[in-house]
Image (tube, rainbow, N blue to C red):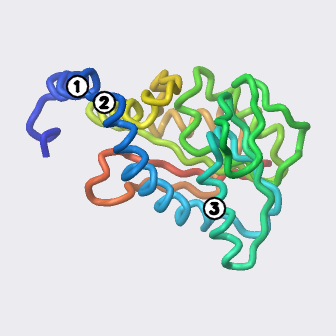
Amino acid sequence: MLSLLLSDSTYASFLDSVTETCPTGIMRSLNEHILFPLRRHYLTQILAAHFQDQQSVLDLGASNGILAARLQKSLAKRHQTIDMIGCDVHVPSKTYIPVVQYDGQQVPFADNTFDVVLMTDMLHHTHNPLQMLQEAKRVSRQYILIKDHYWKSPKDFTRLKFADYIGNEPYGIHLPYNFLSQTDWTHLIEQQCGLSIEHQRTFRFNLVDPCKHILFLLKLK
C-alpha cells in the first residue's frame, strides 16, 4: 500500500493534494453510489447486535436518518419494534425518520426520555465531545451506543481526516477532525463523564478499509 511506502509527512501531503484537486461532483458520486451504501450495510449489522429489549431510540447526529431507518427495518425482521427519532444540527429536506433540529449543544428533550441514545460518527464533528456525551447521558434511561473512530499513529489520523473530508466536505458538514485515541476515549467516557463501558470493540469494515473504527456500549450507572 502507498501508505506503507511514504513517510507520515509525505503521505499527509499526498492526501492534501488529492483533496484539493478532487472535484466535488466526483466525491458526491463516490459517496452516494459506493461509500455510503457500503457504510450503511456494515453499520446496520454491527449496530443491530446491540439492541435487545429497548423500545425508544434517539439517533443523535442522524443526518437524514437513513441509517436509523435501515436499522429499524433490520430489527423488525427479528420481530423487534423500536421507535426512532433523529436529532441533527442540519436537517435535510427529505428524511427517513422524524428528525428534530438542535443547536449542536443542548439536546431538545427532557431527562430520561429514551432507552438508548445512538451516536454514530458524530462526536468527532463536535468541538466539545464531553458536552455532547453528557447531553446523551441526560436524555438516556439505559444505554448510550457510540460508533466512532480512533487512531494510534499520525498516519492513522491523516487517513481519518482524508475519509472525513471525502464523506462530508461536499455537503458542507463542519470538519474539526476531533478524533480521539483509545486512551482519550476511555478517559472521556469513564473519568470525565462517569459512564460504565459494558462492551467495547475495535474493527475495520473490510480488509481494504483504511480507517480504524471503535464501538462502545455504555451503561448508565
Which structural element holds mark 1? helix
Amino acid at pointer 3: Leu
Q: Residue at x 18, y 29 (%)?
A: 11
| Res. 158 mark | 2
Separation of marks 2 and 3 at Cα, in angstroms: 30 Å
Amino acid at pointer 1: Ala
Amino acid at pointer 2: Thr
Q: Residue at x 19, y 21 (%)?
A: 13
Mark sitting earlier along the chain (2/1): 1
Separation of marks 2 and 1 at Cα, in angstroms: 6 Å
Q: Residue at x 46, y 40 (%)?
A: 182
Q: Residue furthest left?
A: 5
* For residue 181, above or below residue 32: above
Graded by Cα atoms within 10 Å as few (under 14), some (14 to 19) or many (20 or more), the crowding at tag 2 reads: many
Which structural element holds mark 3? helix
Which residue position is annotated with label 1?
12
Camera-side residue of 9 and 43:
43
Asked whether, in this view, residue 209 is left or right of residue 55, the answer is left
Determine which quarter of the picture holds residue 156.
top left
Q: Residue at x 69, y 30 (%)?
A: 132
Graded by Cα atoms within 10 Å as few (under 14), some (14 to 19) or many (20 or more), the crowding at tag 1 reads: many
Q: Are marks 2 and 1 in contact (CB under 8 Å)?
A: yes
Which residue position is annotated with label 3?
71
Camera-side residue of 116 and 26:
26
Q: Position of residue 96 (x, y in %)?
A: 68, 51
* For residue 206, above or below residue 153: below
Mark sitting earlier along the chain (1/3): 1
Camera-side residue of 14 and 214:
14
Separation of marks 1 and 3 at Cα, in angstroms: 35 Å
Q: Position of residue 97 (x, y in %)?
A: 72, 51
Q: Position of residue 51 (x, y in %)?
A: 69, 65
Graded by Cα atoms within 10 Å as few (under 14), some (14 to 19) or many (20 or more), the crowding at tag 3 reads: many
